[in-house]
Each structure stands twice: as C-alpha cells, then as structure tokens.
C-alpha cells in the first residue's frame, strides 16, 4: 500500500513537472535588453521574440533592424540565417543595410529627382549620381519607438518612425509603423502601415541578407532559388531601370524553376555585368493591390532549410550580395562576396520617374500598406 501511494505521489509530481515544461514551451517570450547607446545618449534596445518551436528573431529599434533570426534545420538544429554585426557601432557605420527597414524609398531614384503634382523634388544623392534606400541616413539609421503588441499568431513587436517634412529632401511628414511577428508557423511576418500629411512617395522594404546553410563561411551560390516572375525591369550601368521589361526566357534571369544561384551568375550577359551579379527587380506574377501571393523560394539542400517569400508587392529585388567584400564583420566572420542574399519586396525601382510602373505616391488621408512574409520550413 505504502509503495503504491509513493508511486502515486511520484507519478503526480512528474505529471505536474511535465505540464509546467509544456506550458513554458507554449508561452511566447518577449525579452528586452540594452543593445547600445547612440552618440547623443539615447539608448537602443534589442527585443527577442521566441515562438513555440523555439525559433527566435532579435530586433533593435535602431533602423528596425533584424540582428538575428534562428530557425530549425532538417535535424531540428536552430541556427542563425541572417548576417549581422556584433555591436551598435557596426550598424551605425555599416553601408550594407544588414537587416534594416530601408526607406522612405527603398532602391534607386535616378539622380534623386522626381516630380509630384507639378513640383520638382531633389532628394539626397548617395549612390554615385543616384538616390539609394532613403538617402544618407534614411530610415535604416534612425531610432524608432518600439512597443510589444498582442497577436494570437505569435510574439510581435511594432516599431514606429516619424520622418519629418523635408527629411532627405522628401515632402511631407510620414509616420511609418512596421510590425514584426514571429508566428508559431515559423514565419517572420512584416506588416507596414504608413501615412503622410502632404503628397509624397513611400516604398519601404526589408533588407536582411539570408544564408540558410547555418554558416556564414559558406556562400549562397548553391542555394536553389525560384522566383514567380516572367520578366525583370532591366537597368542601365547606374542600376536605374530603363522603363522596359525583359522576358527572362532563355536568360540567366529565369528562376521560374529551382536553379542554383551560382549556375549562371558569371554568364556573359549585360544585365549581370551591370549588377556585378544579380541585383535586379523581378516583376512578380499576379499583382493585385493588397493581395498576398507566393513570390519566391530559397532552398539549401544540406541543412534542408526552405524559405518561402509571400508578398503583396508588385516587385522583388533579388540581390546576391555582390558588394560584400570582407569589410563587414560580425558573428565570428568577415562577410565575403555572396555570403548573403536579399529578397526585397518593393515597387519597381525609379518608379517615381516611370509613369508606366505601379505608383508609389501617397496622399494625405491614404494609408500605405505592405505585408511580406518569410516562411521557414524544411524538406
Ligand atoms: C541594392 C544594391 C545595393 C545594396 C546595398 C541592394 O538592395 O539593390 O545595389 O548595393 O542594396 O547593400
């Protein structure tokens, strides 16, 4: 009898312990730590979101930057799949836009000039004679305000930046909120919402460099890429779109079936020469304002990691890390050529000067919205 009751007590105890462990696993964790201090004394925080499977995303409120993203491989091992620096200084000095939200205008505007409602504007020129990713400072080097938000899909963080009228030459005061959610389905969901008080342009995007292999000593050349697009918007030498469309059929730009990034990257093809590799906008199929659809897939065979990108945007910039040259360092490595790839959901580059492209104009009373999802599975 004594033995039986001892057994019952032990059994009950183990059941309680097990259910506590289960509960802990079911609880999404949001942690906040100090990441660094800006020269003017303002503190920068890092937030860690952990979902039910243990995947994590770390985000700082400087540039709304994703500093780390750990996801499972085929064997259940969590590894970081985005490049990053080790300190705030790295992000302040860096010129590669690691993990950031870039804006007001992601990508290039020819000569930094455009006309809106009959008025000419000149925005900062920071890429040769052109404007790139919001200018000298842009949204990616500003401090945002962060708030944790409740979302039944998983842990969530909202970051907001208010961009002053005239900042980098852009008209109107713009308020942009970006919400990162690490869903329990292992998706990094990025939802944008923007408003303005004067007619302006808005085209923000996310700039993580992904490497699904689990080691940044590997390049991304053997990653298999699929892009849901029949054409690209070709560019000139300065990487400004020509306004034309180029059919990808029988060119190295055809990623309609899974193809390794390295297979044709050195082919003699004018567009690849201009981009020093892939650095182009793909015209995504089935664009319909506000409608989310599959845009791309990246598969890394050794780890089994598969990343699927969904977006409601008309275009996707695929950048194969052609300007990484070992200068940027972090996570124990110097990032060498093509050790990360970006898939930036956006409107077509230089669209303010190309009336035939979808519009990026935002007027008072309107709400800019974008949803882009990077989903992680294995196969
Ligand atoms: C652009 C590249 C640029 C890079 C900056 C990409 O989005 O397409 O041309 O060099 O950002 O790191």
Image (tube, grey):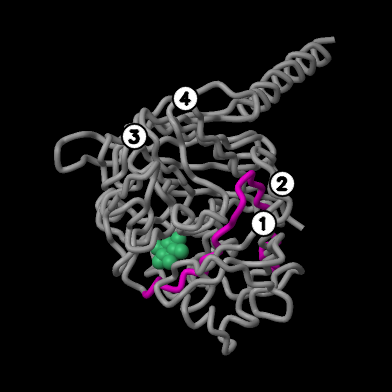
Q: Nearer the viewer, mark 1 or mark 3?
A: 1
The earlier-in-sequence mark between 4 and 1 is 1
Q: Are marks 4 and 3 in contact (CB under 8 Å)?
A: no
Name the secondary structure under disc 2: strand
Q: Are marks 2 and 1 in contact (CB under 8 Å)?
A: yes
What's the residue at 44%, 67% (across, down)?
240
Distance (Cα) linking label 1 and label 3: 30 Å
Check the image and report above or below for 142 versus 127: above
Residue beneath disc 3: 144
Residue beneath disc 1: 284
Asked whether mark 1 and ligand 1 are closer than 8 Å, the reply comes as no
The earlier-in-sequence mark between 2 and 3 is 3
Name the secondary structure under disc 1: strand
Q: Are marks 2 and 3 in contact (CB under 8 Å)?
A: no
Q: Are marks 2 and 4 in contact (CB under 8 Å)?
A: no
Q: Nearer the viewer, mark 4 or mark 3?
A: 4
Q: Is residue 308 magenta?
A: yes
Residue 60 falls left or right of residue 365? left
Residue beneath disc 4: 365
Name the secondary structure under disc 3: loop
Check the image and report above or below for 77 versus 35: below
Q: 8 or 286: which is nearer to us? A: 286
Q: Is residue 167 magenta?
A: no
Looking at the rendering, which quadrant does residue 182 occupy? Answer: top right
Percent position of residue 325, x then y: 37, 75
Distance (Cα) linking label 4 and label 1: 28 Å
Residue beneath disc 2: 293
The earlier-in-sequence mark between 1 and 3 is 3
């Amino acid at each position: 009898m004594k033995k039986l009751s001892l057994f019952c007590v032990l059994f009950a105890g183990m059941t309680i312990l097990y259910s506590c462990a289960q509960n802990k696993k079911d609880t999404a964790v949001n942690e906040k730590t100090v990441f660094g201090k800006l020269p003017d004394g303002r503190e920068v925080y890092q937030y860690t979101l952990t979902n039910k499977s243990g995947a994590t995303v770390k985000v700082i409120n400087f540039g709304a930057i994703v500093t780390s993203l750990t996801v499972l491989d085929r064997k259940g091992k969590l590894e970081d799949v985005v490049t990053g620096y080790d300190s705030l200084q790295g992000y302040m000095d860096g010129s590669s836009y690691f993990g950031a939200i870039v804006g007001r205008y992601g990508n290039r505007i020819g000569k930094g000039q455009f006309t809106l409602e009959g008025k000419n504007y000149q925005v900062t020129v920071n890429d040769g004679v052109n404007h790139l990713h919001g200018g000298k400072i842009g949204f990616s080097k500003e401090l945002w305000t962060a708030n944790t938000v409740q979302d039944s899909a998983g842990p969530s963080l909202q970051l907001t930046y208010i961009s002053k009228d005239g900042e980098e030459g852009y008209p109107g005061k713009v308020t942009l909120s970006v919400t990162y959610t690490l869903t329990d389905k292992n998706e990094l969901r990025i939802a944008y919402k923007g408003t303005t008080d004067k007619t302006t342009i808005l085209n923000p995007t996310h700039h993580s460099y992904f490497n699904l292999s689990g080691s940044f000593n590997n390049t991304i050349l053997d990653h298999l890429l699929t892009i849901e697009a029949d054409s690209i918007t070709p560019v000139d030498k300065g990487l400004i779109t020509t306004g034309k469309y180029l059919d990808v059929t029988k060119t190295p730009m055809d990623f309609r079936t899974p193809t390794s990034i390295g297979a044709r990257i050195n082919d003699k093809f004018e567009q690849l020469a201009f981009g020093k590799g892939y650095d182009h906008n793909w015209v995504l199929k089935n664009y319909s304002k506000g409608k989310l659809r599959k845009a791309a897939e990246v598969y890394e065979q050794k780890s089994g990691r598969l990343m699927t990108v969904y977006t409601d945007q008309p275009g996707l910039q695929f950048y194969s890390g052609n300007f990484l040259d070992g200068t940027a360092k972090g996570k124990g490595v110097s990032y060498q050529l093509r050790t990360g790839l970006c898939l930036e959901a956006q409107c077509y580059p230089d669209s303010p000067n190309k009336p035939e492209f979808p519009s990026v104009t935002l007027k008072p009373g309107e709400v800019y919205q974008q949803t882009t999802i990077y989903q992680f599975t294995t196969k």
